[in-house]
Image (cartoon, rainbow, N blue to C red):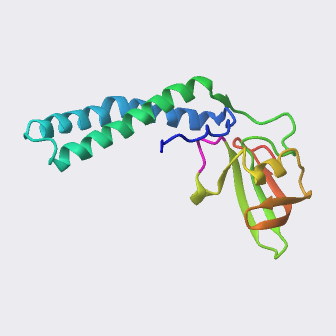
Amino acid sequence: MGRWRPPPDKSSPYVTADGLTKLKAELKDLWRVQRPEVVKALAAAAAEGDRSENAEYTYRKKQLGGIDRRIRYLSKRIDVLKPIEGTPSDPEKVFFGATITVEDADGEEITYRIVGPDEIDASRNWISIDSPLARGLLGKRLDDEVSVETPGGMRSLVIVEIEYEGGGGR
């Protein structure tokens, strides 16, 4: 049986200006720092002799493959990304890049930031513009009630604050 997988869904090409800068820095670091270090370690491991029983050689080959895959991905992805910066014409509405505070039915407030799929960070509540929650929030205004189908079930949320980097919103 092969390792074929269906192609992933197309993700949005949007990214924050800061996110694009970080992706470019990661690509530069992979090329100039990480890859040369791994190649040097791989060459040293290969010089040790029998490669069939050389764990260091096998590990470094896999590590180099992972770095090369990430370099290929970033090289292609950076070319299609569209950086979005600045405050939208209507900062009272939820758009890409917004930081939104919502209140759930229990009165608990949660803050999310809508970012591109390459910038997702669960620890900071940065959600992809392609996520069901973000799609449900886009275009809504302050005090709007939003019902969103999530993996945990239907959630009812009220938007209590909308902010944009640079101070736009309330």
Left or right: 13 as drawn, with respect to 94: left
| Identity of the residue drawn at 16% across and 44% down | 52
Placement of 133 over or under 129, stated as above or below: below
Furthest residue in direction right, as rendered: 144
Furthest residue in direction bottom, as rendered: 106
Main SS category, magenta section? loop
Give the extent of the magenta segment.
116-120
| Identity of the residue drawn at 56% across and 29% down | 77
| Identity of the residue drawn at 92% across and 57% down | 144
Q: Estimate the x, y position of residue 160 in percent, counting from the top left.
A: 84, 60
| Identity of the residue drawn at 67% across and 37% down | 11
Left or right: 7 as drawn, with respect to 157: left
Q: Estimate the x, y position of residue 114 in percent, counting from the top left.
A: 71, 47
Along the line of sight, the residue nearer the viewer: 111 or 169: 111
**Can you see residue 170?**
no
Left or right: 76 as drawn, with respect to 89: left
Placement of 51 over or under 148, stated as above or below: above
**Can you see residue 34?**
yes
Along the line of sight, the residue nearer the viewer: 44 or 88: 44
Q: Estimate the x, y position of residue 10 in percent, counting from the top left.
A: 67, 35
- Number of residue marks: 0
Q: In which quarter of the image is residue 125?
A: bottom right
Q: Quadrant of residue 6?
A: top right
Q: Estimate the x, y position of residue 51 in percent, counting from the top left.
A: 15, 41
Furthest residue in direction front, as rendered: 1
Q: In which quarter of the image is residue 32?
A: top left
Along the line of sight, the residue nearer the viewer: 116 or 38: 38
Along the line of sight, the residue nearer the viewer: 80 or 4: 4
Left or right: 78 as drawn, with respect to 43: right
The stretch drawn in magenta includes residue 119: yes
